[in-house]
Image: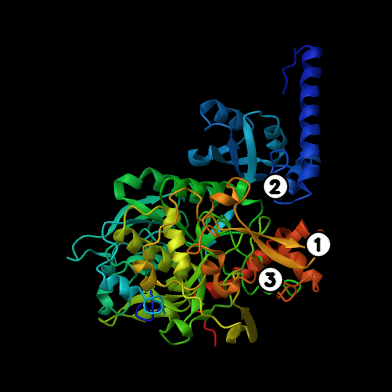
């Protein structure tokens, strides 16, 4: 979308031996859980025992008998897909079943905190994690990303299905009709929130307004604006999987359930792309996060997953300058993670600069290089959802169409940059339907526009503050989406799943450098495409962001080791110098950092 787009007691007669047996069993459960709890406090982003680190406070209250009637929403994962027997055991503990999540061999529950230690003793349970709250990540485009070049080549997304996992899609907007304006291109609706899908103000399917806006960026045809606000793939089919409610809020389990359904519907609607303009803090390594496992399942099923990087780029703790703030599931190395730029009133690629709110890598715990690329996301005009929450909260962001009615709306954020890339993926898949997710990702990353300045300064009026952006691989990734070069490129990465895995980085305390490491614990470095040839070398992918063979930063990095407080925020315990990044970045800052600025236009100068 461009400037053309503008904008969840024993019985009395029991024998003493049986009673002591039960007590001994409970004692063993408590001892095991206590040991696990003590280890969990060590952090490192890994599950120790069966509990994720951010469940440690609740587990502690359970052990101390201080939980009372407190309940917690969790996702429990098993060695095999849980059946009625497993569900019955947790329900006997007082749990309520919220979602069956077969894609991650799990179930989402609301369970008494006092029952958590009992889960540790179940040999079939692998892990227990918080069912985290989730929300949309909001904060001028076709021309800046050279999308018209793909249109001129005859590509418009026809025949490709894109699943929008968001707050819903109001399919009554004429821009979502087919070329005859008689049938909607929103081919399927399903709700996973369990909340009403309409209100008395006329809102239907989308009560928040975020998902409709995202859908317009992907595939609006510009009918009510004379083509002025046209989406990236104006003939694409859209699958509406509603995971966020009227306040733009959901949970891990609602999103996982939606991803699971997208996989199930893949063949029915030719779903080749999933758009996730949402996110939350990172509380565990991606290797053990059920949300990340879900997006990987979709990727391995042949669906390209495009995810927002997050809007925490202005969070500067101890001078960290917004580094280490990528949200989940954008921290997963399989998916395409998108940061946001702003157009500065021009359509040239050279005019695009990094939006100050766009989250930066490396990722918490795993230090994965993210985002993968950037796309325009500031002041994007797309479809309005009449009667929805955002329209009511920010009436000044309404935009009139050709008929003089408020048919469009302005939003900013990595939420808006993400569908630009999702729509572009649909164009590439129309051009060559045989492309695998890894091949799509590799092609997009190697063909990006990479000619950035060393740094720029953005003035944010409502904060009365300047923000300095450095153009490194943790800020802009491989560069700005460039569809002109992407559609003309014929290079093919290997079809192996994981070939285009985003690499991780390591810090060498001996010389103060940060270097790229190919692969991860599950995918070996020699099976990853980057660096295997001249075409796919790291210098080709990340341009001048790479110096030397693999060193990405020396002692001159913005949060260098001379500023240990800032450095430890980004690197956490991996340097042995500071506190866990997650406890700092994703603690009290989450609710405030994800503030109202990201829901409406966030002008920068």
Q: Given this view, does label 2 or label 3 mark the residue nearer the observer? A: 3
Few, some or many residues within 10 Å of mark 1 (<14, 14–19, 20+): some
Residue 119 position, x and y percent, is: 67, 34
Q: Residue 473's quadrant in the figure?
A: bottom right
Mark 2 or 1 closer to N-term?
A: 2
Q: Residue furthest front?
A: 534
Secondary structure beneath disc 2?
Answer: loop
Alpha-carbon span between mark 3 and mark 1 = 20 Å
Q: Which residue is mark 3?
A: 553
Q: Which residue is mark 2?
A: 46
Q: Residue 36's quadrant in the figure?
A: top right
Residue 257 position, x and y percent, is: 47, 46
| Left or right of 513, for residue 90 | left
Residue 26 position, x and y percent, is: 77, 27
393 or 186: nearer the eye?
Answer: 186
Q: Is residue 120 above or below residue 593?
A: above
138 or 43: nearer the eye?
Answer: 43
Mark 3 or 1 closer to N-term?
A: 3
Q: Which mark is residue 578?
A: 1
């Amino acid at each position: 979308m461009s400037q053309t787009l503008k904008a969840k007691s024993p019985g009395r007669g029991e024998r003493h031996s049986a009673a002591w047996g039960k007590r001994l069993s409970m004692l063993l459960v408590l001892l095991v859980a206590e040991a696990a709890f003590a280890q969990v406090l060590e952090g490192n982003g890994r599950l120790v025992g069966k509990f994720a680190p951010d469940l440690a406070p609740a587990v502690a209250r359970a052990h101390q008998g201080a939980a009372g009637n407190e309940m917690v929403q969790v996702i429990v994962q098993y060695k095999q897909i849980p059946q009625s027997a497993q569900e019955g055991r947790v329900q006997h503990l007082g749990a309520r079943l919220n979602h069956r999540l077969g894609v991650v061999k799990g179930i989402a529950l609301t369970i008494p905190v006092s029952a958590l230690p009992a889960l540790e003793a179940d040999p079939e349970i692998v892990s227990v994690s918080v069912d985290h709250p989730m929300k949309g990540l909001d904060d001028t485009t076709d021309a800046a990303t050279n999308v018209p070049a793909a249109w001129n080549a005859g590509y418009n997304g026809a025949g490709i299905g894109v699943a929008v996992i968001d707050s819903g899609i109001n399919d009554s907007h004429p821009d979502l009709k087919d070329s005859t304006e008689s049938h909607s291109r929103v081919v399927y609706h399903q709700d996973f929130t369990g909340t009403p899908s309409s209100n008395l103000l006329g809102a239907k399917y989308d009560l928040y307004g975020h998902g409709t806006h995202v859908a317009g960026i992907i595939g609006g045809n510009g009918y009510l604006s004379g083509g002025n606000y046209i989406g990236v793939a104006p003939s694409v089919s859209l699958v509406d999987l509603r995971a966020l409610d009227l306040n733009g809020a959901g949970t891990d389990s609602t999103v996982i359930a939606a991803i699971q359904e997208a996989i199930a519907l893949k063949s029915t609607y030719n779903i080749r792309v999933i758009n996730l303009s949402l996110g939350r803090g990172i509380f565990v390594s991606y290797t053990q996060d059920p949300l990340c496992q879900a997006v990987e399942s979709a990727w391995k099923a042949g669906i390209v997953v495009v995810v927002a990087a997050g809007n925490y780029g202005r969070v500067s703790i101890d001078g960290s300058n917004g580094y280490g703030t990528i949200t989940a599931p954008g921290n997963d190395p399989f998916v395409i993670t998108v940061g946001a730029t702003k157009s500065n009133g021009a359509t040239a690629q050279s005019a695009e600069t990094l939006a100050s709110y766009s989250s930066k890598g490396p990722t918490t715990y795993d230090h994965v290089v993210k985002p993968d690329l950037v796309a325009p996301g500031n002041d994007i005009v797309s479809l309005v959802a009449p009667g929805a929450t955002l329209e009511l909260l920010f009436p000044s962001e309404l935009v009139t169409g050709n008929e003089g009615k408020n048919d469009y709306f302005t939003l900013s954020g990595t939420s808006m940059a993400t569908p630009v890339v999702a729509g572009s993926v649909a164009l590439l898949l129309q051009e060559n339907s045989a492309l695998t997710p890894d091949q799509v990702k590799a092609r997009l990353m190697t063909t990006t526009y990479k000619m950035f300045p060393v740094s720029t300064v953005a003035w944010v009026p409502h904060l009365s503050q300047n923000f300095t952006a450095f153009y490194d691989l943790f800020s802009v990734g491989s560069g700005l989406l460039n569809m002109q070069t992407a559609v003309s490129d014929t290079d093919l990465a290997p079809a192996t799943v994981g070939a285009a895995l985003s690499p991780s980085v390591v810090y060498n305390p001996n010389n103060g450098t940060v270097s790229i490491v190919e692969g991860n614990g599950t995918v070996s470095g020699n099976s990853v495409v980057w660096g295997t040839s001249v075409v796919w070398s790291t210098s080709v992918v990340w341009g001048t962001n790479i110096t030397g063979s693999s060193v990405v930063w020396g002692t001159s990095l913005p949060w260098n080791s001379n500023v240990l407080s800032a450095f430890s925020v980004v690197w956490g315990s991996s340097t042995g110098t500071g506190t866990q990044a997650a406890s700092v970045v994703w603690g009290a800052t989450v609710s405030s950092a994800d503030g109202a600025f990201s829901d409406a236009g966030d002008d920068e100068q």
